[in-house]
Amino acid sequence: MPLSNQQLATIFSDIADRLEIQGEVVFKTRAYRTIAENLQSLPRPVADIWKEGKLDEVPGIGKAIHDKIDELLRTGKLEFYERLRADVPDGVVAMLQVSGLGPKRVKEIWSTLGVMSLAELEAAARAGRLRGLPKMGEKTELKILAGIESLKRRATGRMRIGDVLPIALQMRAALQAVPGVQNVAYAGSLRRGRETIGDVDFVAATREPAALMEAFRSLPQVESVLGSGETKTSVQVQNGLQVDLRAIDPAAWGTAMQYFTGSQAHNIRAREIAQKQHLSLNEYALTPIGEDGSPADQPLTFDSEEALYARLGMAYIPPELREDRGEIEAAMKGTLPRLIAREDLRGDLQMHSTWSDGAADVLSMARGAMALGYEYILITDHSQSLGIANGLTPERVRAQRQEIDAVNQRLRDEGAAFRVLQGVEVEVKSDGVLDLPDDVLAELDLVQASVHTSLSQPRERITERALSAMRNPHVDILGHPSGRLINEREAGDYDWEKLFAAAAEHDVALEINADPARLDLNETHARRAVELGCHLSISTDAHTPDGLNQIIYGLGIARRAWVTPDVVINTWPLKKLLAWAQQ
Ligand code: DGT
Ligand code: CA
Ligand code: CA
Ligand code: ZN
């Protein structure tokens, strides 16, 4: 197949992008942009015109471009373009898509800071490293971060839950204060705790819907109103996120919350169960129906979901389980699991301090955890080969032990029943060898091993790499096992069944990393791992004391995976945890 007009156009506009990043002046690159546009609006395949020898009749074509199209159609390649691609990395070109970034700035960021991908750009902006560059400040950084966020959203149409929940909480607080509003909650995928959110669905109980709709449209977060009626309004807020609000009668709170929480699959199953009992279920009520399907009695309304589920002969089903994955059957039999909850956690087993790439010292992290009611934390700074994160050498591991001992002494003196444990997030190098010697690992309270590099290794290789890490008797936890970054980087291609079997055999706990960019293990893998007898840990990977609050996202995933407290090692008392790590 000869190259299509579209393919050729893409190549020419890419050439223009790369030349501009290299510093070429715009009037020299304009010819490439012009031909790209003209090719797209050409009514015939340019390959046919070329065959007829009439390339010169294509508008906007000069000698240089004529030769390039000729080379591309003859050989399928263009040497000039190949060289250009080698000179300017793809990741640098990708930065042009971020609104607010033109070729000049991209070049500046690339050549001065060595930033070569969107992920590195995001990290640099978050770390405040752009503000030192010419004509760039804190505002530019924020604008770039917002631009990256909306790019990610465009890729999948879904946003990470961690970028949505804070906005929803702000809006809910504002709606709660509107006169006449008795109750407001978010329903939909956000309430079910999914890792990504399509849109936010608010349900509000009020007898004055008009006032509520007006107040909603005027919230400071609203960028545009997509549609507004008497009882339903949809708006768009930052990063293109859509938020729906439905006003309902307070008497129908239970049915409305059940309906709008979904999932759709769960609702369909719930309606089937209702039908078998000659009841028709919708967002307003449960209505008895006769043999002919018409209403046989007054509709029943429910002011709570508990009452509604009970009337259907079911135990209350936590929102995270409502995906039609067996929860309805279990609720009817009374065999729903007792899901893990925030109060079950006694500690957090992954966090970084200023010893590697964290922003707070050990004592501050401890104080943050104590404020959350925890009994212990495990400090897991990076190991030496992760140079960009200031990883620990054996000497620095031992120096850190001194500081941790001193912090523990200080907390004991204050009378606090709290313990800082020393761990490490040791690199599993690309050949499966750990980045710190065994005698160093042996001195630590718990060891977490993680893969950060060469994630694209073939299945057998990367699986064997994780397995060899787990065979090391000092390794207690495998951190963020898949390595994926939501909306950003694919997971490693592991043989999961094999990995879970090995984790169970060596009794290495698998982490549910609560960072909303990771949520790794994901819910399907976490559920399967537990089925195969694995232990889990649920931890934040926090780099600041505030980051410890992100545990809620990991708990959501665990609950969606039907996880009970007993299999999660950081629900255990300290003594039990340390004894387990010893054996
Ligand atoms: P999302 O927004 O894609 O992350 O996922 P959801 O689950 O929030 O879906 P959404 O916003 O379309 O609808 C919210 C809930 O409303 C959904 O979970 C169940 C309910 N719902 C919406 N449309 C239908 C429908 O056609 N039939 C039924 N049974 N329920 C629906
Ligand atoms: Ca939704
Ligand atoms: Ca919706
Ligand atoms: Zn890590």
Image (cartoon, rainbow, N blue to C red):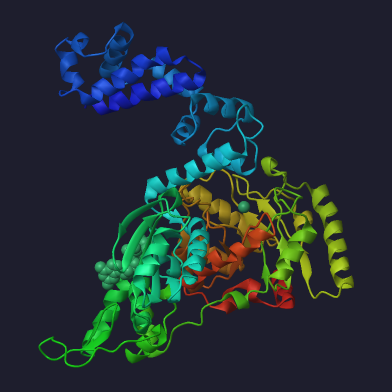
> Residue 476 location in percent, x, y?
66, 64
Residue 262 visible here: no
Q: Quadrant of the C terminus?
A: bottom right
Q: Which is more toward the observer, 83 or 45?
A: 45
Between 494 and 25, the one nearer to me in the picture:
25
Which residue occupies 26% across, 18% down? 73
- Residue placed at 50% from the left, 59% from the top? 167
Q: Residue furthest left?
A: 292
Residue shown at 62% from the left, 64% from the top: 549
Front-most of residues 330 and 17: 17
Does residue 279 show up? yes
Position of 362 relative to 258 (above/below): above
Residue 550 locus on image (x, y percent): 59, 62
Residue that protrudes farthest toward the bottom in the picture = 297
In the image, residue 279 above or below residue 569:
below
The image position of residue 436, as x and y in percent, is 73, 50
